[in-house]
Amino acid sequence: MNDRPTIKGGEAVYRVLRDQGVTTVFGLLGGSMLELYDALHGGNEITYIGARDERAAGHMADAYARISGGPGVVLGAQAGPGVVNLTTAVAEAHLAYSPLVVIAGAIQRADLGKDTFQEVDQVGLFAPISKRSIMVNEPERLAPMLRDAMRLAMSGRRGPVVLHVPRDLFAADVAEPEPGPVTIAKAGPPAPDEVAAMVALLANAKAPVIVAGGGLKWAGGADALRQLAEKLDIPVVASTGHADIMPHGHPLFAGQGGPRGNAVASRLTREADVILVLGARLAFNSTFLSHDYISASAAIAQVDIEGSAIGRYFPVSLGIQADAKETAIALNQAVVREGLTGAGWTDWLAGFQEERAALNAEREAEARLDSVPLHPHRALAEIRDALPEDAIVTLDTGNACLNAADRLAHHQTPGLVTPLDFGLVGFGYAAALGAKAAAPERPVVAVMGDGGFGFTMAEITSAVHHNLGVVAVVLDNGAWGAEKAYQSEFFGGRLLGADIASPPYDEVARLCGANGWSAETPGELGAALEAALADGGPAVIHAKIDPEVLQTLRKDLFATQK
């Protein structure tokens, strides 16, 4: 018999969050869980950050999880439309494997199935875009199911969990929840024979490369990766969106590979004879599933926490289900024990370093482009030079940001948050606010196009209200640039819907109580960013970039249209 004292459901939810170590939650106030909001107010141990749109609140929580290690908690406080607004953020987190925990308000149990006000099948809506979407039906199940949602979001391959709570449960009497955090099982290291097999592959290599991705970042394995690369003099390529996996400028780091990366990194993976894949899926966003980016003859050793990811897109010689960080640590120990060095691939390494030096010189030349409006590469160079080494950068999807991950500078892991495989426009600014909440001591810069910033510019008011000193750099080419590029190249320049007009976002920022700068000529953007970072408050820099410089990423989609 349960003899623990009873409390209200809203208070129980608050205590579960507190006991799991949650210190910040995001949301938008709604009538479906006012008892939880009252408990948050009364408990005063969890910071609440309110957004102007549920989608933005979800992106904030997603980025918060990626910087802090998770989970990120968002409150869908209004049943029906408020919760439905979160679907985009949950889909984004689902394809980023980000541990988002959504507490979604639902209509009261007595009204379920009656087509009542704001009723929608929330459980079914989120089922295909989350690890689990489930309704709490009984008061006594509220706290245990929330604890389980937290555990599931953080276990194995991470991801979003959506817990739907009828509004009457927040007011119901429930027993005090079990105290203390839930247990999160950790994946282990590879077996000794698997480590030996990886060492054997490397011992016979003439042209090896390491491809490292999000699984290694989530595991906190950046230092172990760097040590392994230095012991063996092996080049490292980052999978798409994870160019912060090694410090910018490290002599063994090639940067981001694949279609959104650079030619040097892509050549390494295309011509390697051994590819050691640590916490990366080699999926579409990084490879286009093409041997243009992954050698058809290489022996691939793929390590992933999720067994179904191994060998899914490219056949592997060695597949290992294990923690990427633990694998890097085990390999470090094994190569020392076996006396393995990079003597077998000195020519390969020398060729890479020569190409890398040429790429660096090319990037430095981009920093001297003097056209007006700014060439996009000059704009990114100015941002790169102004970024402090401890900065966090968030990006959007779109033409203005197409090469930004690889052209900017990332010195700490984690230090880069991108939309990844969902390819979401409008993600970057809200994500930056969540990143700042997770790491208030670090500078945070959001780099976006003018179209993407328009999605969430209302969140300037959230930044001001919660004193989140994020600097948004809006690269304005007056267009939905990716689509305009395709219409221009493949549809004879017949433009419809491509050109857009934006307000002066720097002035909008000042009207909202933030700071604002504008930039158009060479040198202005970098100076504005330095000034905004020195000021420390919320700010927007509106930079005009050349609307004629557009890039098509894929050539196969519309080839028959010419």
Image (spheres, rainbow, N blue to C red):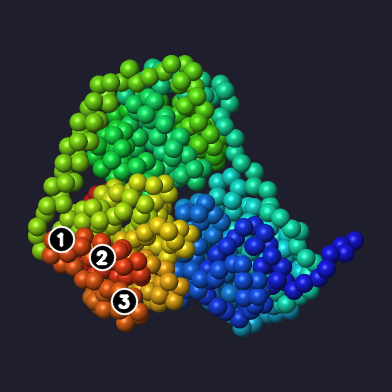
Q: Position of residue 238 (x, y in %)?
A: 36, 41
Q: Which secondary structure lies at badge 1?
A: loop
Q: Residues within 10 Å of mark 3 (few under 14, many from 20)?
A: many
Q: Are marks 1 and 3 in contact (CB under 8 Å)?
A: no
Looking at the picture, which amino acid does disc 1 mark? Answer: Gly
What is the CA distance from the residue labelled 1 to the residue labelled 3? 22 Å
Is residue 383 or residue 282 the one in the foreground? Answer: 383
Q: Are marks 3 and 2 in contact (CB under 8 Å)?
A: no
Give the residue at mark 1: 523
Mark-to-mark CA distance, 1 and 2: 12 Å
Residue 3 in sight in this render: yes
Q: Nearer the viewer, residue 182 or 557?
A: 182
Secondary structure at numbered mark 2:
helix
Q: Residues within 10 Å of mark 1 (few under 14, many from 20)?
A: some
Foreground residue among 2 and 206: 2
Spot occupied by residue 249 in the image (x, y as percentages of width and height):
28, 40
Which kind of residue does numbered mark 3 sit on? Ala
Residue 351 picture quarter: top left
Residues tagged 1 and 2 counted as in contact (Cβ below 8 A) = no
Per the image, the residue denoted by label 2 is 531
The image's mark for residue 509 is: 3
Residue ID at (49%, 43%): 220
Q: Is residue 458 left or right of residue 93?
A: left
Residue 547 placement (x, y as % from top left): 17, 64
Disc 1 vs disc 2: which is toward the camera?
A: 2
